[in-house]
Image (cartoon, coloured by chain):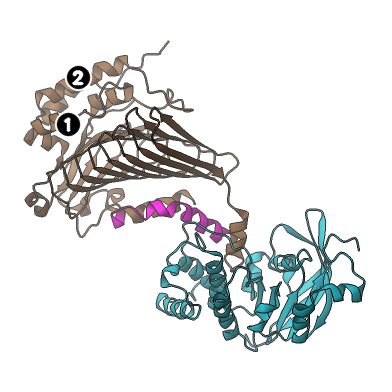
Amino acid sequence: MTAIPHLQIKNLRAKIEDKEILKGLNLEIKGGEVHAIMGPNGTGKSTLASTLMGHPKYEVTEGEVLINGEDLLDMAVDERARAGLFLAMQYPSEVSGVTNSDFLRSAINARRGEGNEISLMKFIREMDKKMGTLEMDESFSHRYLNEGFSGGEKKRNEILQMMMLEPSICILDEIDSGLDIDALKVVANGVNEMRTADRGFLIITHYQRLLNYIKPDFVHVMMQGRIVKSGGPELAERLEAEGYDWIKEELGIEDETVNANV
Amino acid sequence: MSVDIQLRFDAEAITEFSRANQEPAWFLEKRLAGLKAAGELQLPVLEKTKIDKWNTQQFVPFQTSPQVASVQELDEVVQGQINLDNANNLLVQKNASTPFFAASDELKQQGVIFAPLHTALREHGDLVEKYFGQVVAYDEHKLTALHAAAVNGGVFLYVPKNVEMTVPVQAVFEVAGDDALVSPHVLIVAEAHSKVVYVDSFVSGEGSSMVANSIVEVFVGAGASVQVASVRSLSADVHDYSFRRATVDRDGSMEWILGEMNDGNTVANNTTILKGQASTAETKTISVGTGSQRQNLTSQVQHIGTHSESNMVSKAVMTGEAVSILNGITKIEKGAEKANGEQAENVLMLSDKARGDANPILLIDEDDVKAGHAASVGRFSEESIYYLMSRGISRQAAERLIILGFLDPVVAEIPIEEVQNRLRQALERKLG
């Protein structure tokens, strides 16, 4: 890809069943940038990730999302992925009977298209190398996709997929939850290896801890289903030290969750 | 009230076929007893499946065809099931003939008898008589009686004490032509501490109203281990009835791997009797229901020995308007202390018009046992489809991955590569 990746989210509103969760969210991510979205529970962070990927439970009611100038919301889930979007999920599915390596090879070939499939040798080489970076045992390639994986193993497996698929816009949804500090470092290492000018990141997290290892360029705070404050890395540090109350005070917010009547 | 339908063969035809094959007198007697019983006995009563309108007895049983000199001359559907470059331990039966048979010197040197049933009846009649019909009696119901009367081939596999077969033996059974019948009787005797692997495939050629009626009897000696894999891919023009049963002595183990890929109506009953202490049984079945076919598939284990253990897994994918009844029966007899029987039936529904019933049945007459079952009937997990699609895989490809993944844990266990490949092809064909 020659053009610099670009994700534009404009006034995005989305609901699940009859409940509106995203209430007019704006954000722009370019290649080379790492954005972090922080915020307390129930403010719509994971909904943003799922809505962008196209999870069938979420319905967009208003707004626009463009990926490299194209209408993302008009695409099916697999088309979004092939357009360069990747979501490392908080709770990835377990798929019995499908091995990790068969799955990954199908995914890579879906992107490359018929007649341009990756050679088996090259695939194995790449996979071995990336599993090495993530300190994953080689048995993982033959195990069924996420089946019986621990929480930490699932997270590593998400990052492995990201490294193998080389997307241009990466969303990491609470990749740090359930990871001990050593695993966190390994995962961060994998992400940092992928930070280049032709790739943008959106990192969703509760905790500043992750951002010690993946340094963001921009930090956003989400409340009531939209971004209420943005800043640089120093914003994350202040949140870690002081919590969210000062923002609520500053903005006159009493209930920060999406349940608030606004 | 029953309408009497004439059979299309009689005692005379049976006697003629028996003489032509130089069968011993006791075998002809069994046939004639079967013919008599067929007129008196009822069809088996099956859970949620009525078979009285199925073709159970309208066939011409003794259709023969010539032998071939090499595997290359076999029918194409048969060739697909075998390794053409290495057809060493192979029996091919077509209707009432055995067009091809080969047994390796290696097996003979080990003392293994692997022979067409007719040859074994001539050369090892006493040995066959000792086992034939001992676990599946000819007069259990009309279908076993018809089988006894019309049996038109089969396999005798005898493995002596302490002999471990180094290669699997294979049989391919073909039914072809209007009103044809393939009715093999497979008799496997594994003496103490032997090891046996047997694989068969059922295929069909052109023809209308064909019938397959087969019986498999397995005798697992003390400490012996037997693995039987069977893949059936008969066309919609065949109605298939199979009764497979094993009896297992102390410390013996029996493993069944079954691929029910027929397009036509199917009744299959697969039973293991765990007679001996610490004997074990493992039964894995996959099936795909397509079109308007009806299937009744029963897996059953009877625990008699103490510390006996069993595990049954059945997986079915349902499409079109097909109906499949999956019965899992774990029976633990009084005195089978410390027995442990587990079973699971899982049905994946791909069509609103199809029906898949999973019936786990536990019958337990002993207190000191463990037994469990898990049954599920469900559709695709939309969450899994979403996950696969989120990596760029199309919905269709994602569904295919999930279906094949659902069945693969059983497919991968088939011990002959060609049969495994054909099973995968049969899956692809059935799933369109």
Say the numbered circle drawn on residue B131: 1
- Letter of the chain that mark 1 sits on in the rendering: B
The image quadrant where one finds the N terminus of chain B is top left
Q: Residues within 10 Å of mark 1 (few under 14, many from 20)?
A: some
Q: Nearer the viewer, mark 2 or mark 1?
A: 1
Q: Residue B185, located in which quarter of the rendered image? A: top left
User: Which residue is found at the position 49% from the left and 59% from the top?
Assistant: A148
Say the numbered circle drawn on residue A190: none
Asked whether, in this view, residue B11 is left or right of residue A2, the answer is left
The reply to whether the magenta stretch includes residue B410 is yes
The residue where tag 2 is placed is B32
Both marks 2 and 1 on one chain: yes
Chain painted in brown in the figure:
B
Vertical arrangement, residue B83 with respect to residue A39, above or below? above
Vertical arrangement, residue B166 with respect to residue B369, above or below? below
User: Which residue is found at the position 82% from the left and 56% from the top?
Assistant: A19
